[in-house]
Amino acid sequence: MAHLTIEELPSEEYYMPGNALCAGCGESLAMRLALKILGWRTIVITVPGCMSAALIMGASAVPLLVGPFASGGALLSGVETALEAKGVKDVNVVAFIGDGGTADIGLQALSAMVERGHNVIYICLDNEAYMNTGGQRSGATPLRAATTTTPGGRLFRGKLQPKKNIPLIMADHEAPYVATASIGFALDYMEKVKKAADIRGPKYIQVLCPCPVGWGYHESKTVELARLAVATRVWPLYEVEKGRLKITYEPRTPKPVREYLRAQRRFDHLTEEDLAELQKLVDEGWAELKLKARSAEE
Amino acid sequence: MPVSRFIDGNAAAAYGVKLCRPDVVCAYPITPQTPIVEYIADFIARGEMASKYITIEGEHSAMMATVAAASTGVRTFTATSSQGLAYMQEGLFYAAGSRLPIVMAVVNRSMGPPWTILAGHDDAIAQRDTGWIQLYCGSGQEILDTVIQAYRVAEDERVLIPIMVCFEGFVTSHCYEQVIIPDQEEVDSFLPPYKPPYKLDVEDPMILTTFAPPIHWMGYKKKHDEAMEAARKVIAEAEAEYAERFGRSHGGLFQAYRCDDAEAVVLTMGSLASTTKVVINKLRELGFRLGLLKLKSFRPFPREELKQLLGNVKAVGVLERNYSVGGWGGAVFLELRSAFYKVADGPRILNFVAGMGGRDVTPLEIEAVAKKTLRAAQEGKGEREVEWLLGEIG
């Protein structure tokens, strides 16, 4: 497949500026870039979260439906089925839903929507906590990250459990297309959105969206953090098509995980042992991913 | 030609839905509503019904997928009961607040615990403040006719409010009766295709379920209430036109039976009305001046119409399958009393709580209810304002 170039990107904007989201918001970038690819024949679904706060106040130039927190998958199913009933075939139905609305409260509706095989795109804007309510832990919060409900203290150092792996759970649902992405790798992300739009059935993309407020870094560093997550292999970029996993970007010499963690206040409390533990976890995760990619090649 | 079929209440609902040609049906099974879901699946499988069917994974999603489909501008149907209705509650507010003309069959079953799968109106009554119209039916024929009328009322631009078509679990849902199924063409001419005033449309983009700042939020609710008021008229109009076209009437907002010269009236909803009718006829033969008022529309509550009709009656006994714990009465009783507040010589109003959790309500019990109400009419007082019909076991 020929790769996208910056010159080819459409100049049209469907995600409007001047909305309620913070300076340096990773999610804003993720919505703007995806809508550039999907274009005006798109209906957007969202549920409560930072993105809904922006979209509901007029950031969406395309039709928008907002529903209850748990209902993302159901809303996609309803809109897609109604369009099918009307014989409309050329409209993208896409959801922008946060990691809490995906990994926690909305998992049932998402799982069932994928199982039923609706022709939609589900984009999880992953900022790794409930940022809209001030940063509480979600199932997608990584191990040891401090949130307001998992503070970094003497007894408990941040979240005690690792991040729930929704992309692989979706791949095991046999969704025709599953991908991870990072707003720090814009063209890779947009190519994946484009690919998703061209495949029939339920598509799932989880895009890492750093959050200056929740993660604790300067708002000018969002893209840098999003790149660092990939460069340290904390957030590998891959896609799973018809069950075959392919790593779409491989950092030649991975940076130490410490570099990524030390750039964020949510990991301030980490001890040297914690850093070593997290490095080990990332290494193991990468090795496992490579194994999956290799077995897909064979 | 219309055909007469020997079917149960759930099938009557399903046939009614089929005649209304919804574009999207989305429902999740729950006893005693399950046969509706199955009958519709069968109609679709046999090619008798062209609806798209979402076999959804739970009631919260069922309501929200239905809301999403309706927001996309198509006619929709769903059905549930009891715990399922409660699980939907967040979506009920979405449907009503978004002013979507969804029609839903609610097969009434009491809320557990204690666990039960049997009749009670407490499930739907608990949802009275969600902003839905609630119509209570007592027979298969009434269910079928009401489903058809419900789409007409819900989709009326003066209304645009979702409607629950309610009927009791097993007592009505599983009871077989002869039901006349009208011609498709006749229904088509009574119910034109749905033309949504607003919808998700890429040609005309708009944000639905938008945010309302404090200066506007209450205004939306006021408009909703005004539409609910308008629905009283629209329900009556739809009923009148239906009666003219199809030759059957179930009374619209309510049905009064032998109320004209009655001293006392028993007021009830749904299937209890048919048993009460038999009792009233028997007592009339014995010279007791009793009437029956079968209330169909609980939301909107037809308070003005009821005040007018019951204004000259000396006592009303409200026999109902629900109770508001801590509220000292069933919902219909409390609302009726509230309607008559400040009416100087209004009727004495008694409450008889009965038939929840599937408890049988016998003709003998209803006879006692009727006689107690008549005694209150004649003596100007009742023994107790709220009485539970618990029989000997309790």
Image (cartoon, coloured by chain):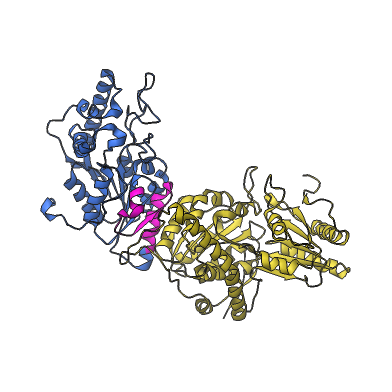
Chain colours: A blue, B yellow
Image coordinates of residue A47 in percent, x first then y, are 39, 49
Corner quadrant of residue A84: bottom left
Q: Is residue A129 left or right of residue B6?
A: left
Q: Is residue A236 visible?
A: no
Q: Quadrant of the C terminus of chain A?
A: top left
Dominant SS of magenta comes to helix
Q: Is residue A215 left or right of residue A233?
A: right
Q: Which residues are magenta?
A: A53-82
- Note whether B45 is above or below A142 in the view shown: below
Q: Is residue A206 left or right of residue B382?
A: left
Q: Which residue is pictured at 59% across the width and 51% down the height?
A: B82
Q: Is B390 contained in the magenta span?
A: no
Q: Which residue is pictured at 64% across the width and 62% down the height?
A: B301
Corner quadrant of residue B47: bottom left
Q: Count the marks.
A: 0
Image coordinates of residue B23 in percent, x first then y, are 43, 66
Image coordinates of residue A129 in percent, x first then y, are 35, 37
Image coordinates of residue B104 in percent, x first then y, are 53, 61
Q: Is residue B340 left or right of residue A50?
A: right
Q: Is A81 contained in the magenta span?
A: yes
In the picture as drawn, the residue positioned furthest to the front comes out as: B215
